[in-house]
Image (spheres, rainbow, N blue to C red):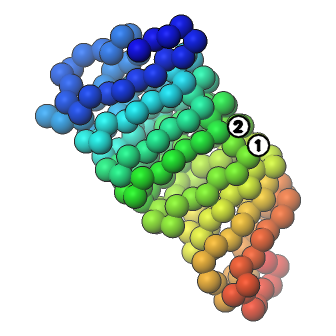
Amino acid sequence: SNTGERLDLDLPAMLSNTYADGVGEIVFGTRVRTVTGFNGHIDLKGITIPSTATSIGNAAFKDCTGLYKVDIPDGINMIEDYAFAGCDRLVEVNFGTGVTRLGSNVFEGCTGFKEFEVPDRVTSLGGYVFKDCNPDLKVTISYDLLMKSALNKTGHIILKGNPESIANNAFQNCTGLLSIELPASVVSLGSYA
């Protein structure tokens, strides 16, 4: 419903190929599978993603500058490239239990984040997930995921998990990195870490 000040969408579990109040196109098969087509809708503030969806599509909510909170249902396993890029008022993302992959530049330009915790179940992280975000952003992430991703290492990094050592050159050339919080399990730092 559109209250003039706030536009909230509650997408039903089953839809036909239609437009929802001019908000955008919803892509699906016999059941909603991929949510996409809302990019550039500046009045969009909150969304409820259908439980039948399994992914949030490429640039699905890109440049939705009014969007401030997203609840990701358990069925979503992939958030594709640029899905929330440019959502500069986005301050809260609540992940369900299913997300295992975050595409490249997913939260690029989301300057509203102060802190962000990458869920433990995420096993694949695209490049530049937090590009051009708040330079003071605190990202909590597992060491293993951090080392195998192209995450721009800026702001503050809080490592979780139980790594015993930090690899050689782990944070080399991270000129924007302000601090690193290591877990108590770390007993060894590699050369030029």
Image quarter where the N terminus lies is top left
Which residue type carries mark 1?
A: Asn
For disc 1, the marked residue is: 134
**Of helix, strand and loop, which one carries label 2?**
loop
Which residue type carries mark 2?
A: Gly
**Of helix, strand and loop, which one carries label 1?**
loop
Q: Quadrant of residue 133?
A: top right
Q: Residues within 10 Å of mark 2 (few under 14, many from 20)?
A: some
Position above or below: 100 against 168: above
Hey, which residue is sitting farthest top in the picture? 4
Q: Nearer the viewer, mark 2 or mark 1?
A: 2
For the residues marked 2 and 1, what is the alpha-carbon distance in whole angstroms? 7 Å
The label shown at residue 112 is: 2
Position above or below: 55 against 169: above
Q: Residues within 10 Å of mark 1 (few under 14, many from 20)?
A: some
Say whether marks 2 and 1 touch (CB < 8 Å): yes
Left or right position of 188 against 110:
right
Hey, which residue is sitting farthest bottom in the picture? 187
Left or right position of 175 against 94:
right
Hey, which residue is sitting farthest left in the picture? 30
Front-most of 50 and 151?
50
Image point (82%, 79%), residue name: 192
Residue 29 place in picture, x, y as percent: 17, 34
Position above or below: 26 against 166: above
Residue 4 place in picture, x, y as percent: 53, 7
Q: Earlier in the sequence, mark 2 or mark 1?
A: 2
Image quarter where the C terminus lies is bottom right
Q: Quadrant of residue 97?
A: bottom left
Residue 25 place in picture, x, y as percent: 33, 20
- The reply to whether residue 26 is visible in this rendering is yes
